[in-house]
Every structure is written in structure tokens, then in C-alpha cells.
Amino acid sequence: MKHRVILHSDANCFYASCEMVLNPELRDKAVAVGGNEEERHGIILAKSEKAKRVGVKTGMPLWEAKNLCPDLIIVPPHFEYYSKFSKLLHKIYERYTDYVEPFGLDECWLDVTNCGVDGEIIAEEIRQAVKDELGLTVSIGVSFNKVFAKLGSDLKKPDAVTVISKENFKEKVWPLPVSDLLYCGRQTTQALLSCGITTIGLLAKAPLDFITRKFGKNGHSLWVFANGEDDSEVAHKDYYVPPKSVGHGITCIENLVNDEEASKVIVSLSLDIGYKLRKEGLHAGGVSLVVKDENFTHYSYQTKFEATTQDEGLLSKEAIKLLKKNYPWVFKIRALTVTAIAIETTDTPVQQDMFFDYEKQDKRKKLGETINDIKDTFGKSAILPATVLDEKKMPKKRQEDTVLPGIMHK
Ligand SMILES: [Mg+2]
């Protein structure tokens, strides 16, 4: 295989750093981006270097972070700005190559094989340009494949460049814990540890047939990664990755106490999902419901459909069924997330089913298109089903809004 030069650039403390550029008074302070405290959506979404040093973690409730760090400044998120900064970062990357593949808002792979310049030199130029032009810092990994480039960007930060070459990867990468490997999730890590495979090097040296037998396809690819043989390509900047799931979740202002209250929230969450599916031309093959109770315990339920759909009515009906069938109601519900799963870009042919009402399906489809038109013209809250109107427990503001990309963060 041809020798490739791949960079992975990761903006350091991205949300918090953007906030510091927007408001220089925050510089060098312990800053965290988090939900509104009064509405008690309170968790830390991102933190500055200084906040990190005293133990503030992403996902931590705001009150806990405040206890740890009394002078912590909490600012609400400004996603529209982060997305602008993200585009500006891409503009800098695109000076070198058209092969720029995002991984979330703050990370990108670049294939600079054909630049005719040493990868490390390009990385240094980019690092400097980002600092001078945007006031942000990035750490960049330079390597011969995507997985090691990503690893490299984690090794030294902030504002640094790390080279992992064919000559030095055994020395630099192999001693690292196996969980540092991209796509080595918590469960796989546990399973590998139970076989005594603690480092990337031990995984690389394990017999492939043993790994495949024990860990299947995922194990096979992790073994390939560990040996530096990842040959996946960096996508072109115009490449569109269809989302694997389209979801919407919310933390309620007051805890929900019964099926009826939870159902109203589910109906309301499903609305946006139907809208997004139609907008993106996607079809859901199933739905998942994640319930977080008042003790922060998560319950996750899902179901697959016989045929795909874009219909929010069907999505919410099935999600409500999941709730009624499964949720034990020992504790009140704090947060709910509805996600359309098994996403397909085309409609799967509906099975011949004598009980299936085609006419009704057709009408529903037309209704969906009309709903999108109205929402595009008059705004997203122009149409709400009667069940969610005047509901005092509905949050004032929508909180998490997720269109998950095809590739997920570890
Ligand atoms: Mg980052």
C-alpha cells in the first residue's frame, strides 16, 4: 500500500476556548460551559484547562462542579458560535487538502499525502495559523493511518504536534492502554482486560484467530488498528455521512410521575425527529427510548419496525409502548430521549400485509410533508399536537438536539 500522510487535528477544550475568544475576560479562569442552573438542566458540557485541573468533568452536575471549584464561571452554550469556529478551522485545513473529514465539531482528519511537503511541517503551520488567526489551540497527530493520527493528537496537548511513524509506533503506541484505541469501547476494554490484554502492544501481538474467535469483527478491526494496518480513507470534504440515528432528548423541569406525563414528553420529542427525517430524506427502521430516573439510573429500550417510517405519530406510539411495557415506575423520571434508529436513506419496500392500510399510510406521508412545509415557513413550534399544548412540565427550551453522525465518538 502507498505510504500516506494523515493528520488528526483536535481543538483543545473547544467550547470553553471559543467562549474565551468571544469574551477575553474569561481567559485563564476556571470556565465551564453548562446548562442553565435554574432550569436544572445542569450538567457540565465542557471545561477549560484550569477547571479540568481541579477535577471538573464533562457530564458532572453543575452543583457538584461548583463544590469542587467555587470560583468556577459557568457560561451557557452557544452552539451557533462553535459551529462557526468549526467552519473557520476547516477553512484553514482546506488550504492544504480537500480531504478533510470531521469527527465531531472540534476534530478533523486530513490526508496531506499529495501536498509534497513533510506532514510535520504542515502540522506546525496549521497549529500556528489556528493560534494566530482564531485564537484557539489544536493538538495534531501526524501518522501513516487515521487511527494512529488520532492517537497522536491525544498524546501531547494543548497546542502541540506528535508524530507517530512506521519506525516509532511500536515504541510510542504499544505501551499505551488498549482503551486508547479508537472504537475500543468500555465493554470491549473490559473483555480484553479479562484476557490479560492491557496494552495496545499486547493486543497487536495476540494471535489474530484467538482475537477474532473471542471478539468477532470488532476485535478483528481493533487488532488491525493495533498493528498499524488501518487503511480507511479520509473522506472528501463534500462527502455526506448519513446519520446513523436521529434523536432528541430532554431533561424535564419537574420530574415526571406517570405514563401519561411521560407520554406527552415523548410525543413532543418525536415531533422534531419526524421533521428531521423528512428533511434529510431518511427513514427509521426502529425507535429507542432512553429513560433517566431521578437517581440518574439509565434504562434503555428499543424496538424495530416491520417497515421503515418518517412518521412522528408512529415513532411516538411505539416509544410510548416501550415505556408502558418496560418502565417499572419505582422512581420518577428526570430525562427522556427518543431516537430513531436503523436509519435508511431509502424507503424499504413494505411487506404485503393484508392488515396494512396503504391508503392511511399514504395520507400520513402527505400530512408529514405538509407539516414540514408549515414548520419551514412559520417556525418549528407552529404545529404541536393537542396533547403537548399547555403542558407546564415541558421545558421552556429544548436542550439536547442530536443528529448523530455516521461515526460516533468513542
Ligand atoms: Mg477537542
Image: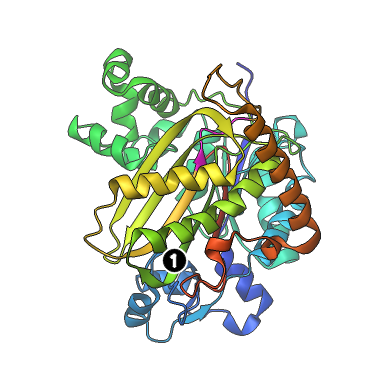
Q: Is residue 394 left or right of residue 234?
A: left
| Residue at horizontal 34 percent and vertical 20 percent from the top | 216
Residue 45, percent across and down?
Answer: 48, 65
Q: Which residues are magenta?
A: 340-344
Residue 346, percent across and down?
Answer: 66, 27
**For the residue carrying disc 1, how many other residues have a C-alpha within 10 Å: few (<14), some (14-19), or many (20+)?**
many
Inspect the magenta stretch and tell me whether residue 385 lies in it: no
Residue occupied by mark 1: 251
Point out the image quarter for the C terminus. Answer: top left
Q: Is residue 245 left or right of residue 345?
A: left
| Residue at horizontal 78 percent and vertical 51 percent from the top | 373
The answer, for residue 385, to whether it is visible in the render is yes
Q: Is residue 295 left or right of residue 108?
A: left
**Helix, strand or loop: magenta stretch:** loop
State the image quarter where residue 385 is shown.
Answer: bottom right
Residue 121, percent across and down?
Answer: 68, 45
User: Is residue 362 or residue 152 the one in the foreground?
Assistant: 362
Q: Is residue 317 above or below residue 282?
A: below
